[in-house]
Structure formats: structure tokens, C-alpha cells
Amino acid sequence: MDAGQREQLQLAMRALAAGDRAAFKPVFSTLWPVLRVFCDRALHDSDAAHDAAQTALMKLFMHAAEFRADGDVIAWAIGFASFECLSVRTRKVRRREHVDDAGLAAVPADQLSPEDALIHADLRAAALELLGSLRPQDLEALRGAFDGEGPAASGPTVRKRRQRALERLRIAWRKANGHGD
């Protein structure tokens, strides 16, 4: 979402909070895909993500009058969605049958736990998605850094290109995930 779309969303949410029912549709149509993607990444279950995003939007609209004009509507919506995702996960955990200790003992100690493997896979997918958004020159510079090219390929120009490419990657990560490295 670009800055213009985000500003339009802010204006629509302020109007909705002030009682303008015509602002419902633009708020819904802008937030729905954002919350669907967020919930899908959080839950890894398309049906549960759909339900969580729908419930989050329903609660957002129920509390629209409480929206602060100086608040960020995206952050507010993600707050509702994260609570719904947490609720879905909690319900799933409560429904699970008791895990057999023998099954847990069968997992090798040097192997990642299923949770760690899932987190690792999510981070890898997010990083690959961001790499696809970089310029080809940045990708080439990063490829050299990741492949461990030695001192022969590490003159000041190459080092500076790598530094700039890594900084662009960090900025893209912060923009996509809302936090630092």
C-alpha cells in the first residue's frame, strides 16, 4: 500500500468514526486484503485466516466510533487481527489431544522443533519475497556477500555496493515487517 492509499484509508476511517456510513466500503475494501494476508501468514490456514480477518473487521467496525483521529488505522486493524489470530491459535491448542511423550522423544535433539522449523520457513519466505523487490545490481552485490566471495572480490567499490544493498534490504524488511533487522 502506497502513501496515497494509506492517507485515503485514514481519511475514510476518520469519516466512518464521525458517523459517515458511506466510508464503510472504502475502509472495508482497503483493509480486507491487508488483514487476509496478515491472518494467513499468522495462521497458515486459509479458512481460519478468512474467519479471523472477517471477525477482526467486524470488531473494528463495531468500535469505529472509538477510533482516534490521530491514530494509525492500519495498526489499529492489525491489533484486532492479531487478537483474533491469537484466539484461533488458543482454541486450536485447547482442542488438541494430549501429545504422547514417546512421540516427542522420537524427535532428534539436533533437529529443529516443528515450531522452530515453521518460524524458519516463514522468515525464509519473507526474505525471499523481499529479495525479489530489490534491484538486480543489489541482488548481485548480495549474492557475492552470501556466497562468501573472498578478498579478491572485496575492493572498496564492491564493499560499498554490498553495504548499500544490505541497507536497502534492511529498509525493505522494516517497511514490510514494521521492525528492525
Image (spheres, helix red, strand yellow):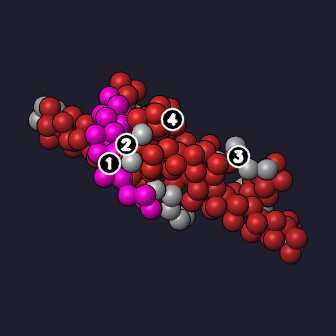
Q: Residue furthest top?
A: 47
Mark 2 residue type: Gly
Q: Label 3, on which residue?
A: 133
Q: Residue at left 45%, top 46%?
A: 15
Q: Disc 1 vs disc 3: which is toward the camera?
A: 1
Q: Label 4, on which residue?
A: 26
Q: Earlier in the sequence, mark 4 or mark 2?
A: 2
Query: Which label was assigned to residue 65?
Result: 1
Q: Label 2, on which residue?
A: 19
Q: Earlier in the sequence, mark 4 or mark 1?
A: 4
Dot 4: element: helix
Q: Earlier in the sequence, mark 1 or mark 3?
A: 1
Q: Disc 4 vs disc 3: which is toward the camera?
A: 4
Q: Compared with residue 97, is residue 9 higher up or lower down, i.e. above or below?
A: below
Mark 1 residue type: Ala
Q: Position of residue 5 (x, y in %)?
A: 61, 45
Dot 2: element: loop
